[in-house]
Amino acid sequence: MKILVVDDDKDIVELLSIYIKNEGYEVEKAYNGKEALTKINTNPDIALMILDIMMPQMDGIEVIKEIRKDSQLPVLMLSAKTNDMDKIQGLIQGADDYVTKPFNPLEVMARVKSLLRRAQHDVKNDVPDVLKVGSLVIKKDSHEVETVTGKSIQLTALEFGILYLLASHPNRVFSADDIFERVWQQESVVSAKTVMVHVSHLRDKIEEATDGEKVIQTVWGVGYKVESH
């Protein structure tokens, strides 16, 4: 598989490239946002992107906005910013995970592997390939979600994973930690806010497509659930 590394700091690009190659992956490199978009558009075999936020010509947030218009490519963000709002902004725009600088390259690779596993295998459950929840039709194999009237809802890989997890266990309440460990496939580390942001964005998309239908319920102080009907 091929991984795109995007950062205006060439030393960081070279460092990550060494670790990526040592794990058996191929590497594509870009040093600004516009170059990153060109690489994505001309390399359909790119499986994941490691993306810096602060870059010339086009920053990482703008890059994510562009690719999320028609792609669910897994994105791991890198940033020197540590403020929670910066992290939340990146997640809302569609990033799948976030690492702050300075980082341990081994941690970056662990997150890369986790994102690739999820993209390949999705959330595994012994449930039908097609689920119906309220006015939604959720298709596991194709990662598609649409309304019963045929209106498509574009979700990121993480948003789909959260929806599918909740929908495949109706009436069961999942805590933020549960969701993080099952969907992100990592041990939970301060995950509640991360999950909250993704659930909020997922709800917005569902409500926009269904004229306000409340599919995901919050159980205050406990977690989230989808009720069976």
Image (tube, rainbow, N blue to C red):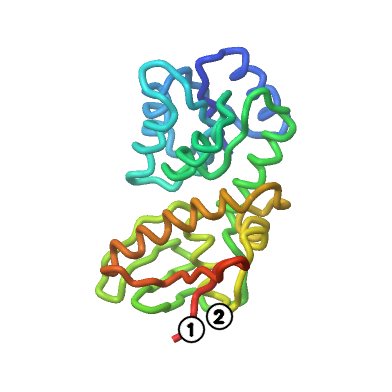
Give the residue at mark 2.
171
Residue 2 locus on image (x, y percent) = 56, 35
Give the residue at mark 1.
228
Q: Earlier in the sequence, mark 2 or mark 1?
A: 2
Q: Residue furthest front?
A: 221
Amino acid residing under circle 2: Asn
Q: Image quadrant for the N terminus?
A: top right
| Residue at x 69%, y 22% (from the top left corner) | 18
| Residue at x 44%, y 69% (from the top left corner) | 139
Residue 45 locus on image (x, y percent) = 48, 39
Neighbours of disc 2 within 10 Å: few (<14), some (14-19), many (20+) = some
| Residue at x 63%, y 64% (from the top left corner) | 175
In-image side of 11 versus 44 (left or right): right
Check if mark 2's residue and mark 1's residue have beta carbons within 8 Å: yes
In-image side of 215 versus 210 (left or right): right
Amino acid residing under circle 1: Ser
- Distance from label 2 to label 1 (Cα)? 6 Å
- In front: 135, or 15? 135
SS of the residue under disc 1: loop
